[in-house]
């Protein structure tokens, strides 16, 4: 069972008011129905969703619904549920703010007023054409599919009411309204009332975030170690140059002492080297002091090279 299927099944198990069921039905029919002359055809693969939509239609319009169950044998055997409505079709579509004067419209302002109604519409859209990646197997991706750009942008505006940033792109002959933020997707699942899926998603998200943080820290630590080693090697090369040309005696005692400790501790950082010198000699010195000493070394080497070049 996919994570999308699990989420849809959990949504359909929650009780909702009749008004919410009407709005949920409006979104579902808008985004999944095949509208024919005097007929509404709904095709579903999820038995729980089929039961929910059947219940919504009966509760709000009390019409007869023809139910057909077929076995589809593509890759694997699965059942397809087909609901057909042949009564009050125009009345139903107008009541659901889908059609007006026989033309398809976006839901009118009066139809979705409250937070609860907005959530009900988004749930209906998700039950109809939504999908959500399993966070344990892929990246974070929530999407709703619509047939027109206007509907895609309308969905993004509804999501924006909850501060969810959704993008709309065209994919084949449809439009996809999608969210990739893990925090936003998690909050949306919570708003849908799918508690079990919410906790599952959060557990995976927290684990992945922690793992990514550890990886970043490890990468940072490796980068720092490489930087320290490169710096140490460069200083050791400078010291070797001083010895080769008998220049160490030209430096003051403190710099010579730093050179001695650098040779003894070639893999330490400047801060660690400063701490070692401070502990062993009783003379307080910091990272900047050690750095200043090796700047003196570098300047002496540069002067010597310039002199020899002349």
Image (cartoon, rainbow, N blue to C red):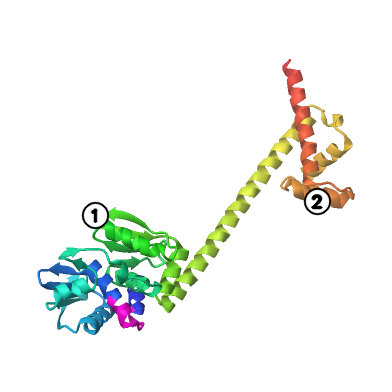
Q: Secondary structure at mark 2?
A: helix
Q: Quadrant of the N terminus?
A: bottom left
Q: Look at the image and say whether residue 14 sits in the magenta stretch.
A: yes
Q: Quadrant of the C terminus?
A: top right
Stretch in magenta = 12-22
Which SS type dominates the magenta stretch? helix
* Residue contact at pointers 1 and 2, CB within 8 angstroms: no
Residue at (33, 67) in percent of width and height: 131
Residue at (17, 68) in percent of width and height: 34
Q: Is residue 108 left or right of residue 250?
A: left
Residue at (20, 63) in percent of width and height: 104
Give the camera-side residue of 240 and 186.
186
Q: Which residue is mark 1?
A: 172
Label placed on residue 275: 2
Instruction: Residue 11: give x, y in percent of width and height.
Output: 35, 77
Above or below residue 6? Residue 216 is above
Name the residue furthest top.
Answer: 310
Q: Quadrant of residue 300?
A: top right
Kindly tell me whether residue 2 is visible in this rendering: no
Tell me if mark 1 has few (under 14), some (14-19) or many (20+) residues whose alpha carbon lies within 10 angstroms of its own: few
Instruction: Residue 18: give x, y in percent of width and height.
Output: 30, 82
Instruction: Residue 66: give x, y in percent of width and height.
Output: 14, 81
* Separation of residues labelled 1 and 2 (CA atoms): 64 Å
Above or below residue 295? Residue 271 is below
Of label 1 and label 2, which has the lower sequence position? 1
Instruction: Residue 157: give x, y in percent of width and height.
Output: 36, 61
Q: Is residue 244 left or right of residue 24?
A: right
Kindly tell me whether residue 241 is visible in this rendering: yes
Give the camera-side residue of 303 and 96.
96
Q: Is residue 264 left or right of residue 118?
A: right
Tell me if mark 2 has few (under 14), some (14-19) or many (20+) residues whose alpha carbon lies within 10 angstroms of its own: some
């Amino acid at each position: 069972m996919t994570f999308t299927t699990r989420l849809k099944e959990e949504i359909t198990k929650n009780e909702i008011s009749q008004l919410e069921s009407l709005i949920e039905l409006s979104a579902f029919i808008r985004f999944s129905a095949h509208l024919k002359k005097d007929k509404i055809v709904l095709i579903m693969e999820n038995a729980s969703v089929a039961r929910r939509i059947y219940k919504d239609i009966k509760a709000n319009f009390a019409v007869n619904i023809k139910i057909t169950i077929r076995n589809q044998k593509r890759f694997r055997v699965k059942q397809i549920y087909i609901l057909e409505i042949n009564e009050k079709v125009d009345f139903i579509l107008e009541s659901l703010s889908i059609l007006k004067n026989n033309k398809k419209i976006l839901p009118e302002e009066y139809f979705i007023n409250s937070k609860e109604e907005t959530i009900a519409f988004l749930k209906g859209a998700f039950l109809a054409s939504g999908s959500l990646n399993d966070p344990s197997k892929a990246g974070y991706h929530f999407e709703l599919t619509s047939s027109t750009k206007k509907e895609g942008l309308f969905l993004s505006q509804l999501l924006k009411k909850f501060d969810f940033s959704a993008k709309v792109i065209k994919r084949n002959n449809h439009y996809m309204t999608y969210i990739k933020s893990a925090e936003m997707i998690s909050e949306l699942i919570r708003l849908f009332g799918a508690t079990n899926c919410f906790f599952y998603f959060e557990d995976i998200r927290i684990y992945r975030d922690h793992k990514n943080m550890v990886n970043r820290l490890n990468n940072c630590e490796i980068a720092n170690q490489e930087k320290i080693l490169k710096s140490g090697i460069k200083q050791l090369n400078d010291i070797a140059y001083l010895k080769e040309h008998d220049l160490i005696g030209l430096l003051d005692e403190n710099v010579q002492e730093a050179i001695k400790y650098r040779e003894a501790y070639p893999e330490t950082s400047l801060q660690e080297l400063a701490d070692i010198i401070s502990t062993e000699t009783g003379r307080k010195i910091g990272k900047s002091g050690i750095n200043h000493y090796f700047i003196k070394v570098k300047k002496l080497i540069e002067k010597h090279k310039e002199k020899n070049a002349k």
